[in-house]
């Protein structure tokens, strides 16, 4: 996917309501990712605008909130997600307007890619990072004539802590039970 816009923005934390500066990347498929620094080593959060964002506001449209030190109300950008709000502050009013326009474009407009086999542009389906599409005639095991093959893969950004935590808790409980039985073993003999 192509990078639509990137740059520094201030983001208000959801718990303590403090402003912190982050590096933001907006991808053309509607994914907004922010990092602690410009090196992009590990991201802090990934927001899917096409799925979870219901409204985008900027400047005077934003509600009354505490501004970052030296910030202007005209530089605010608010993302209304399904279950929470994300408050951002740009360096200037012009930068906030540019971010709002880019966020709107990424949220509402479909993404087109060029298919050299058909010599045409095709719309990329939502959540396209879950599948890789190949053209007709691509020969591999299991290919049926007349059906375009679809190779499905997992999203590398999806975090699956729930399954790992449940297995870890189960392993901990089993280890604890075994250790407690061993601890009492000398008392019985």
Image (spheres, helix red, strand yellow):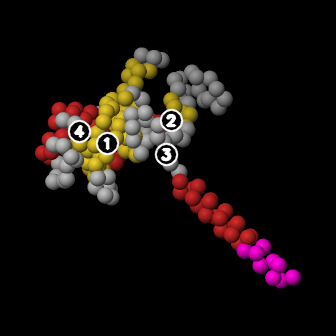
The answer to which of 131 and 19 lies nearer the viewer is 19
Q: Secondary structure at mark 1?
A: strand
Q: Position of residue 105 (x, y in %)?
A: 27, 34
Which of the two discs, 2 and 3, sits closer to the camera?
A: 3
Q: Secondary structure at mark 3?
A: loop
Residue 83 lies left or right of residue 133; in this view the side is left
Do the residues under discs 2 and 3 have CB atoms within 8 angstroms?
A: no
Residue 172 lies left or right of residue 116; in this view the side is right
Q: Is residue 20 above or below residue 103?
A: below
Q: Give the distance between the C-alpha atoms of the residues marked 3 and 1, in whole angstroms.
A: 24 Å
The answer to which of marks 2 and 3 sits earlier in the sequence is 2
Q: Secondary structure at mark 2?
A: strand
Q: Tell me the residue that label 2 is attached to.
A: 131
Q: Quadrant of residue 90?
A: top left
Q: Tell me the residue that label 3 is attached to.
A: 158
The disc label shown at residue 21, or none = 1
Q: Main secondary structure of the magenta part?
A: helix
């Amino acid at each position: 996917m192509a990078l639509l816009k990137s740059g520094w923005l201030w983001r208000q934390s959801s718990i303590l309501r403090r402003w912190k500066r982050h590096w933001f990347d907006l991808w053309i498929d509607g994914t907004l990712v922010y990092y602690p620094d410009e090196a992009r080593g590990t991201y802090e959060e990934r927001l899917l605008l096409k799925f979870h964002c219901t409204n985008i506001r900027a400047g005077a449209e934003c509600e009354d909130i505490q501004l970052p030190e030296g910030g202007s109300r005209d530089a605010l950008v608010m993302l209304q997600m399904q279950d929470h709000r994300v408050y951002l502050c740009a360096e200037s009013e012009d930068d906030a307007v540019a971010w709002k326009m880019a966020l709107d474009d990424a949220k509402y407009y479909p993404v087109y890619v060029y298919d050299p086999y058909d010599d045409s542009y095709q719309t990329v389906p939502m959540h396209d990072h879950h599948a890789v599409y190949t053209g007709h005639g691509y020969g591999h095991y299991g290919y049926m004539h007349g059906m375009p093959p679809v190779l499905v893969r997992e999203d590398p950004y999806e975090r699956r802590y729930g399954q790992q935590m449940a297995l870890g808790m189960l392993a901990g409980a089993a280890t604890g039970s075994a250790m407690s039985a061993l601890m009492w073993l000398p008392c019985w003999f």
